[in-house]
Amino acid sequence: MDSLQFDNAKLTDIPALIELLNELFSIEKDFKPDADKQFRGLKMLIESPATGTIKVVRDSQGQAVGMVSAQLVISTAQGAPSAWVEDMIISQAYRASGVGKKLLAEAIAWAKSKGATRAQLLVDIANEPALGYYAHLGWQTTQLQARKILI
């Protein structure tokens, strides 16, 4: 992990981030890879540092090999900002080495710096490795269930 660099995503990272999202969306049944949509969304996040971030981990050649995004929402339950964590993916070669844990910590630190008092994420209920991973890191399940509608 010494040769890896943790940083904020840049616009030049977008092609590598789209590749990472393709890998993630191939696991999750609710999403389909769409490079144009992913490009637009990644660009919006990168260009909105006051309300969102994409943290990346880069290999020794500077290539993004992992990512996680976080965005702020206002929580009436917390009376403070809350962070939605999404798009957590680490390239296969870098898994099980602590990279994901450090990357998540970077996103949480960003959220705390913005006044957030809670972070939350969605995890595919069929993705057993992800369920175990987040439980291992101390993320708690809730009694809430996600719903969606396209508008």
Image: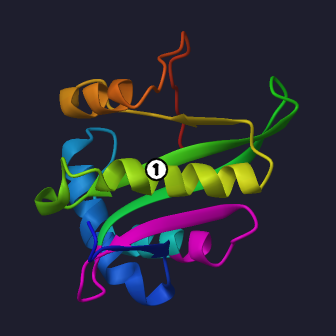
Q: Residue furthest right?
A: 79
- Looking at the rendering, the stretch of residues picked out in magenta corresponds to 43-64
| Residue marked by disc 1 | 104
Taking the image as shown, residue 48 lies to the left or right of residue 120, namely right
| Numbered label tally | 1
Residue at (39%, 75%) from the top-left corner?
36
* Quarter-of-image position of residue 110: bottom right
Residue at (52%, 26%) from the top-left corner?
147
Q: Residue furthest left?
A: 93
Residue at (54%, 9%) from the top-left corner?
143
Q: Is residue 78 magenta?
A: no
Numbered disc 1: secondary structure = helix
Q: Position of residue 8 (x, y in %)?
A: 52, 74
Tell me which amino acid carries mark 1. Answer: Leu
* Quarter-of-image position of residue 27: top left
Q: Position of residue 134 (x, y in %)?
A: 37, 31
- 119 over 18 or under it: above or below: above
- 12 over 117 or under it: above or below: below
* Quarter-of-image position of residue 80: top right
Taking the image as shown, residue 55 lies to the left or right of residue 2, namely right
Q: Give 2 or 141, whichever is nearer the viewer.
A: 2
Q: Position of residue 112 (x, y in %)?
A: 71, 49
Q: Residue furthest front?
A: 2
Taking the image as shown, residue 37 lies to the left or right of residue 93, namely right
- 109 over 60 or under it: above or below: above
Q: Report the quarter where the N terminus lies.
A: bottom left
Q: Residue furthest top?
A: 143
Q: Position of residue 108 (x, y in %)?
A: 59, 49
Q: Give 39 or 123, whichever is nearer the viewer.
A: 123
